[in-house]
Image: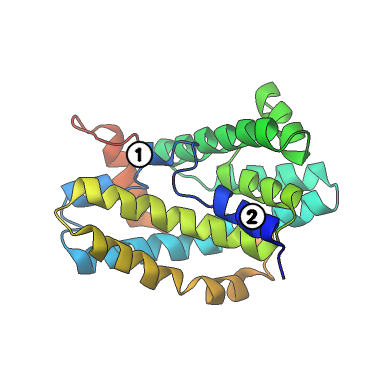
Amino acid sequence: MATIAELMRVLQFGDSLLPVGAFSFSNGLESAVQLGVVRDLDSLRDFVRAAVEQAATSDGVAVLSAFRAAAAGDAEGVDRADRAVFDRKLNEEMRTMTVRMGRKLAEMADRVIGPSAASAWLGRIRSGSAPGCLPVGQALVFSALGPSERDAFAVHQYGVAGMMVNASLRLMKIHYLDAQAILYEINADAEDAYDRVSGRSLDDMAAFSPVFDVLASLHVGAHVRMFMN
């Protein structure tokens, strides 16, 4: 069982208002709404669920791999997970989202937690030897704080869903309680997702999501944008 302090740290670093820039991104939802792919509660639920499932089998695997590498003091293993995430982002906007938020999280961890594996990783980001992707930052933070790899995975999955649901309130005419109901429903799948991917390696990372990639590429050239991504 987690201690009270460990539980509170999960709450702190899993907070959707954590100042790492999630408010600036929609994870492709803005283009989906503009083009009518997402138009009501049902299509919003399906879109967010698909994004969360893709996150589990790709970035979620990297979270677990980086967490284990950090626990073993394996900086090269951490950087391999970092590069694996970056190399699988096929469009500019998704790469921008993950590295901006990852760097901000590393800076926050260095200031709040103090010297840790996240601090060393921040140094490699600044030197250009590591890209600095958000899932790896989440793994390093939780490895330093004491909560489990399961907690790190949960925070990652919650972050993907929470970012998109929060963005939907600014993009669509929906009731905020309906948005929370969608988040509650989708989060119930996280345990099964962890069980499915916990034994996978970086070579098993996969995210076949052509619709997300097309929407993100269209968003780059959009003349009217509320979100960076």
Amino acid at dot 2: Val
Q: Residues within 10 Å of mark 1 (few under 14, many from 20)?
A: many
- Tell me the tag on residue 36: none
Whether tag 1 and tag 2 are in contact, CB under 8 A, the answer is no
Judge by depth and name the residue closer to the eye, 228 or 215: 228
Percent from the top left, x then y, of residue 124? 72, 29
Q: Secondary structure at mark 2?
A: helix
Q: Is residue 1 above or below residue 26?
A: below
Indicate the quadrant containing the C terminus: top left, top right, bottom left or bottom right. top left
Between 37 and 106, the one lying in front of the other is 106
Left or right, 72 with reference to 165: right
**Residue 5: quadrant of the picture:** bottom right
Q: How is the image coloured?
A: rainbow
Q: Of marks 1 and 2, which one's residue comes earlier in the chain?
A: 2
Residue 220, position as x, y percentages in the image = 31, 34
Residue 156: x %, y % from top left: 54, 55
Residue at 85% over, 53% down = 72
Q: Is residue 221 left or right of residue 119?
A: left
Name the residue rendered at 69%, 71% in the picture. 199
Q: Secondary structure at mark 1?
A: loop
The amino acid type of the residue labelled 1 equals: Asn
The numbered mark at residue 63 is: 2
Residue at 66% across, 35% down = 112
Q: Please state the total of marks drawn on the protein image.
A: 2
Residue positioned 44% across, 54% down in the render? 160
Where is residue 215? Give x, y as percent.
29, 47
Can see residue 106? yes
Q: Using the numbered discs, state the Cα–Cα distance from disc 1 to disc 2 in whole angstroms.
A: 22 Å
Among all residues in the image, which is located at the extreme top? 127
Query: Mark 1 — residue?
Result: 229
